[in-house]
Image (cartoon, helix red, strand yellow):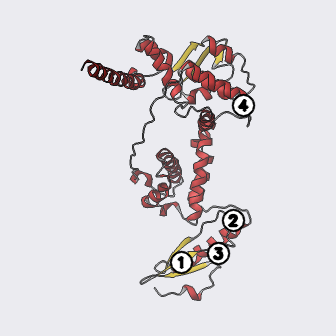
């Protein structure tokens, strides 16, 4: 196909790149005038494509840019952006918990940004290789990468329901399993937790200190604690709630130390633990990040809030509690999971004891000689 595009009234910012035997066409706005957030370049097609389609796509992209520059965001029927919008309006999304919807929102922004970079191309043109390339931006963050893949798969399923595609291309995408280095368990002592809680109180974060104390006193997961409901999860000195991971109902009286804390804690909101700075429910990641900053300032760099639950399991085993007693308290489905928490610390302690014994015996033998 000859380069007839040059003789047609093309929109501004269309540039040709001559290759060997064909030409690539791009929509490229000069960096000095480009609106913030608009991609550096959008490939329109090649000289091998249908000229009329290429011409229409070029003008559509230019009109998109004009709207974007003027603060108007629009998508095109069948684009990833459009499929995101349709999914967000469907019962598949509206029936999800508010927390899940909030988590998905960040990935919708990334998907819509990707749609814009592709010039809002129809979803049928999104191939597995394109998805792999998009997901590669999170190669160093495997957890976020898997979540991005999951949300994109839900959007693709919405595209199937709308009749834009017949199969989900995500099925052909396999992410490489990466072994993440497991952080050694650091057992929190009672003094550690008191130090942390007192620091939270001094910083005006009574809710964060309460979350941490509840986690270790009940040996419950962070996600279940931050979702505790006012007047239901804790009432008259008793705890009662359903674990999100196992679906298991846990009920127990609160310890005296926890009662003294929670009885002073009042919340007029649906959730018990409301972040003082925002007036909204604490999010898991916000608890982790804020706790990390406080722990670092206290010199407790090896401590992490996820180990509060492990610490309590460790103490219960040390005090002779049985598997059945501990599972009734923590809500674990399998005792083997709990034993892993304890065994790791026991092995470390025993290994240290053996090393000390070897050094001691060598010292004794040296003195004898």
Q: Position of residue 117 (x, y in %)?
A: 57, 64
> Marks 2/1: CA distance?
21 Å
Q: Nearer the viewer, residue 130 or 144?
A: 144
> Marks 4/2: CA distance?
43 Å
> Who comes first in sequence, dot 4 or dot 3?
3
**What label sits on residue 25 in the rendered view?**
1
Residue at numbered disc 4: 203
Q: Is residue 270 visible?
A: no
Task: Tell me if mark 2 has few (under 14), some (14-19) or many (20+) residues whose alpha carbon lies within 10 angstroms of its own.
Answer: some
> Who comes first in sequence, dot 4 or dot 2?
2
Q: Is residue 64 visible?
A: yes
Residue at numbered disc 2: 68
> Marks 4/1: CA distance?
57 Å
Residue 82 position by quadrant:
bottom right
Q: Nearer the viewer, mark 4 or mark 1?
A: 4
> Quarter of the image containing the N terminus?
bottom left
Task: Tell me if mark 3 has few (under 14), some (14-19) or many (20+) residues whose alpha carbon lies within 10 angstroms of its own.
Answer: few
Q: Nearer the viewer, mark 4 or mark 2?
A: 4
**What label sits on residue 30 in the rendered view?**
3
> Who comes first in sequence, dot 4 or dot 1?
1
Left or right of residue 230, residue 346 in this image:
left
Q: Residue at x 50, y 16 (%)?
A: 329
> Who comes first in sequence, dot 3 or dot 1?
1
> Marks 4/3: CA distance?
48 Å
Q: Is residue 296 above or below residue 318?
A: below
Q: Position of residue 238 (x, y in %)?
A: 62, 13
């Amino acid at each position: 196909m000859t380069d007839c595009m040059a003789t047609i009234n093309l929109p501004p910012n269309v540039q040709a790149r001559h290759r060997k035997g064909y030409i690539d066409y791009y929509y490229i706005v000069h960096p000095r005038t480009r609106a913030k957030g608009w991609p550096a370049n959008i490939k329109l097609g090649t000289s091998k494509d249908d000229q009329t389609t290429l011409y229409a796509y070029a003008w559509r992209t230019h009109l998109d840019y004009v709207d974007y520059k003027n603060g108007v965001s629009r998508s095109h029927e069948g684009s990833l952006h459009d499929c995101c919008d349709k999914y967000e309006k469907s019962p598949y999304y509206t029936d999800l918990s508010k927390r899940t919807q909030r988590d998905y929102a960040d990935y919708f922004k990334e998907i819509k940004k990707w749609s814009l970079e592709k010039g809002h191309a129809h979803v049928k043109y999104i191939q597995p290789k394109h998805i792999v390339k998009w997901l590669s931006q999170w190669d160093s963050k495997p957890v976020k990468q898997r979540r991005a893949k999951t949300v994109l798969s839900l959007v693709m399923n919405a595209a199937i329901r709308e009749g834009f595609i017949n199969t989900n291309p995500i099925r052909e995408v396999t992410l490489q399993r990466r072994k993440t280095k497991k952080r050694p368990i650091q057992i929190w002592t009672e003094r550690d937790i008191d130090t942390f809680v007192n620091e939270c109180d001094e910083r005006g974060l009574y809710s964060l200190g309460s979350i941490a104390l509840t986690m270790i006193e009940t040996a419950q997961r962070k996600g279940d604690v931050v979702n505790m409901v006012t007047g239901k999860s804790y009432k008259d000195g008793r705890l009662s709630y359903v674990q999100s991971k196992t679906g298991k109902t846990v009920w127990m009286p609160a310890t005296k130390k926890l009662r003294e804390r929670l009885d002073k804690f009042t919340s007029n909101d649906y959730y018990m633990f409301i972040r003082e700075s925002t007036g909204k429910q604490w999010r898991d990641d916000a608890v982790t990040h804020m706790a990390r900053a406080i722990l670092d300032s206290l010199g407790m760099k090896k401590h992490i809030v996820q180990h509060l639950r492990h610490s309590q399991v460790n103490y219960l085993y040390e005090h002779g509690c049985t598997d059945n007693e501990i599972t009734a308290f923590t809500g674990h489905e399998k005792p083997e999971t709990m034993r892993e928490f304890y065994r790791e610390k026991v092995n470390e302690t025993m290994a240290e004891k053996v090393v000390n014994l070897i050094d001691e015996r060598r010292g004794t033998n040296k003195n004898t000689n």
